Amino acid sequence: MRPLAFLVAAVALYWPANTLPMMVTDQFPVHRSDTILSGVAFLWSEGSWLLAALVFTASFVVPMLKVGALGTLLVTSARRSAWQPRGRTKVYRVLEIVGHWSMLDVFVVALLAAVVQLGRFASVEPGPAVVPFAGVVLLTMLASASFDPRSIWDHLGARSVYGRE
Amino acid sequence: MSELAICRYCDTVHRRSEVPRRGTPRCVTCDSPLYHRNNDLGAMLAVTLTATIALVVANGFPLITMSVNGLRTEATLWSAILASYDHELPLVAAALAITLIIAPFIELFLLLWVLVPLRAGARPLGFSTIMRAIHIMRPWRMVEVFLLGLVVAVVKLAGLASTVPGWGAFGIVVLTLALASLASFDTSALWRRADQVRA
Ligand SMILES: [Zn+2]
């Protein structure tokens, strides 16, 4: 039940992570406060399409797919499902690989806050979404680390032409 | 141990001699990659040493230097962590310290701890515990994600000021490449070597 607990906690943080400001920028006389998605929209409007697509994928698409995929894995394993065990194992392997890339925006905000400290001329501050956002990423990572992929196969009986030794 | 390969996703046991010689070795049950073919411990030690030096460089030198209207500021790994701490985000500061400094340092230190004695023909102290610790540590280092973050930050700053990457950024690039190369080695070669040494 540990992976489920981590997943539920991640889902609880999902809303504040996406609705609160992630980064507050003062570039005299302009004051901006951006959520994940408004930050992506701003990049897009400035013509940085590649960057906008990258941040959108890492910060929005990946966490959403991760929560959905983990939920599906947990439910099918709990029901001892025989549905697509190879496919589900592959989904788990993809989760292991992409999981940590969502920390991208946390790193960007931390770097910008460290370097852009020019007093009244310009400053960047991390917004209140940084903690719940990092929380979603780390909790979903904990959920997938504590999920045992063998639970996909445990009830499926004999496993291999070489047998178990 | 030496002649078997166990799939870590479904526990299927394979005889290495029966795994096809060509292509990526894959589990017959679940199709996951079984192991990497690269098992040269000397090369692994060289890459680990390179990564360790790169990590020291990444920690000791500025990542980005920005100058605007005669003002110059720079960000190091540590100042990025301190900036989060100063903004009353100790949890974020801790996450940065763990994923960018502590986890890579521990992993590289532990790898050196096992690789150096194995190369010299001795069984490392606490071998199996350390191997497990390395395995647990791995997902929590995020150097490659940080490298992409550096790129994004530099591009975002381009409109505001002239920004140049520093030696620290070079360290991050080398570290990312070295860690990616480390991931392509067969860690079970370490187990087999440790068994030989004991025998
Ligand atoms: Zn398998």
Image (tube, coloured by chain):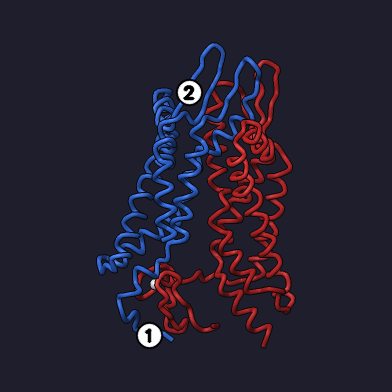
Chain colours: A blue, B red
The amino acid type of the residue labelled 2 equals: Ser
Q: Which residue is mark 2?
A: A33
The structure residue drawn at horizontal position 41% and vertical position 52%, both measured from the top left corner, is: A7
Circle nearer the viewer, 2 or 1: 2
Cβ of disc 2 within 8 Å of ligand 1?
Answer: no
**Number of numbered discs overlaid on the protein picture:** 2
Helix, strand or loop at label 1? It is loop
In the image: residue A72, left or right of residue B148: left
Q: Residue at x 35, y 70 (%)?
A: B30
Q: Position of residue B118 (x, y in %)?
A: 69, 75
Q: Which residue reaches farthest left?
A: A83
| The C terminus of chain B lies in quadrant | bottom right
Tag shown at residue A163:
1
- SS for tag 2? strand
- Above or below residue B165? Residue B44 is below
Is residue B106 depicted above or below B194 in this figure? above
Please tell me which residue lies in front, A140 or B22: A140
Query: Which corner quadrant of the figure contains ligand 1?
Result: bottom left
